[in-house]
Amino acid sequence: MSVRELFRRRLGKESVSPRASLQDDLMKHLARREFMHFIPSRFNIYYLGAVAAAGITAGLLIFSSPRTDRQKTDNNKAVSSDTVEINVFDIQATLPIVVREDNVTGKRITDVEKAGKERSALSHTGTKEARDTGLVIEAAVTGVVDSMKSKGLFVPSRPGGMKLQDSYMNGTALFELSVTKGCAPLRIHFTNNAGSVDSCRWTFGDGGYSDEINPDWIYDVDGEYRVTLKVFNSDGYHASSSARVTVFPKPEARFEISPQEAVIPDDRIRFMNYSSGAVHYRWDFGDGDTSILFEPVHKYKDYNNYDVSLVAYSEWGCADSLTVHNAFSDSKYFIEFPNAFIPNTGGSSGGLYSSKSDEVAQVFHPVYSGVTEYQLKIFSKLGVLIFESNDINTGWDGYYKGQLCNAGVYIWKVRGSFINGEPFVSMGDVTLLRSP
Amino acid sequence: MMRDRQIIDGCAKHDRKAQQELFRQYSRFLLGVCLRYATDKAEAEDILQESFLKIYFNIKEYSGTGSFQGWLRKVAVNTAITHYHKNLKYRYHVDIDEYVSEETGVSSFEEDLFTSEELYMVLSELPSGYRMVFNLYAVEGYKHKEIAEMLGIDTNTSKSQYSRAKAALREKLTRLGRIKKSYGADEQ
């Protein structure tokens, strides 16, 4: 059986089992590619774009109306439904001072009494609305009415006997947060709006606490936290309110460059992505080109020490970046010569070569990478210099003084340097073949 | 087991089940094809994976006439060619030992003398250009003119590379056959 028949019969329909993990890998690749295509039945980048656009529009709508306006509206609602509630707010807002003004409080006590029944329902609404704005506030007012009734004055009988918990201090919470959600590590600045109080106690929900008036706190670990501020004055009054903070996990950007000793600019560089917790990527290859592919392949045009960076984004928009400086400083430059060639018998070509002339190996020249300086000399076995070139693009075509040289062995010697400054010197022999 | 038609329709709708079924039924066959074009199994698996992605996204182009398996094979072969072009570096630089390989080998072999692994190994040792031409001509059955177009080379180059590939294979197989025989003799 001939070679051709042998291979056709034996390998034409041969089956080979792929490694077990290949199917999973393929499905992952497939999911990624499908994500980049528009396929109606699948969630893809176009849908994501639509969702993002919708999200941004909604966000703009919400945030374009200032927060305080919204809160004022909430407050106005309270006014229209129950005038008494407003008074209670006033008391709280100016807590330390108002208490001692007898005529004012006197009037207010009556109002509070009247409103007693409706309070729980109203508080409930208050909580719900507060939740929508990202703040969770316990709005139940306990002990206020009792205390005021019994004393006739707005003074509690024992420290802590009066517990004021409400979101609305003249339309604002006891405190404000610089942000309520963000990526770990999340730094939040808390601003205390409680006015003149003697002391305060912040608990941040992750085990941390502070007695500062306007503290900063950093959440290192992702999760949902409840921040509570309690304010006290010397009379023992205290009020508290809380807010919820959401800290998103931080993705991790990681990648590797393949091949490790890549030759710039000859090699196609593959970037292996080992990031975790991320869904979008942005690569900067350092030469002005970028990519958003998961694992891009890039070809550099010039030699340089490029800084390659990857930014990985999580589904919540959290980012992590990794930059590899001088990513290709390990580049392996080389120069190598073939050990035979067959000159064109039709006449000297001047030593210029192309992939066409290489098809039949007509010109003796090196394959190389990153060569800047170059000098090639070729000697006959008798030591006669028969060829010399300082241009790497000019090889030897096998001619000497217009005459085709004899078949046989010739000696070559090359010296020069690579773009990273490293010099090279090398010598060897080459067999000049004559076409049969 | 799903029928081809169900698989094709399912894949056209990007149905995950159908895609997995297609892989289950045809990956071994297609890897057998890819391995002939690759230098090692890892490269063959790369080509296989790329082929499947092409198949999944272009399955609508399968006309429905002609063998489905044949169509799959064609996609894999084309992917292998693309892969070859992508990784092409100094493709005409062939070691002198390969170039002047004399016709020393015997020209006829028994069908069962070698295992498939051995045949794949011998193929993988060829210079990639030779391997492409040999596979396309001898196994796939393309004409030199078609091969020349596919690989972007001259028809004569295709012919000469084929005959050199054949000679190289013959020599390698002869050597391998001799080694196998001497081992066999030792065992007895």
Image: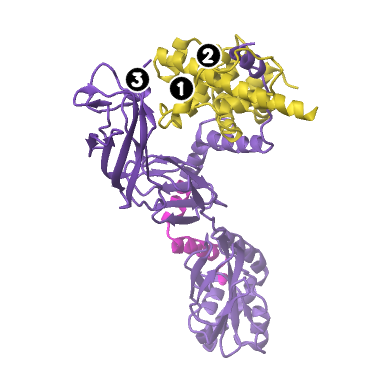
Seen at 26% across and 16% down, the residue is: A346
Chain A: its colour in the image is: purple
Instruction: Specify start and end residues of the magenta stretch as a single range.
Output: A56-85
| Residue on which disc 3 sits | A434
| Residue on which disc 1 sits | B100
| Residue on which disc 2 sits | B137
Q: Amino acid at mark 3?
A: Arg
Report the predominant secondary structure element of the magenta stretch: helix
Whole-angstrom CA distance, mark 1 to mark 3, is 12 Å
Tell which subunit mark 2 falls on. B
Q: Are marks 1 and 3 on the same chain?
A: no
Towards the viewer: B100 or B86: B100
User: Dividing the image into 4 quarters, which one contains the C terminus of chain A?
Assistant: top left
Q: Are marks 2 and 3 on the same chain?
A: no
On the question of residue B14 being in view, the answer is no
Q: Amino acid at mark 2?
A: Tyr
Coloration of the structure image: by chain
On the question of residue B55 being in view, the answer is yes
Seen at 23% across and 37% down, the residue is: A391
Mark 1 touches mark 3? (CB < 8 Å): no
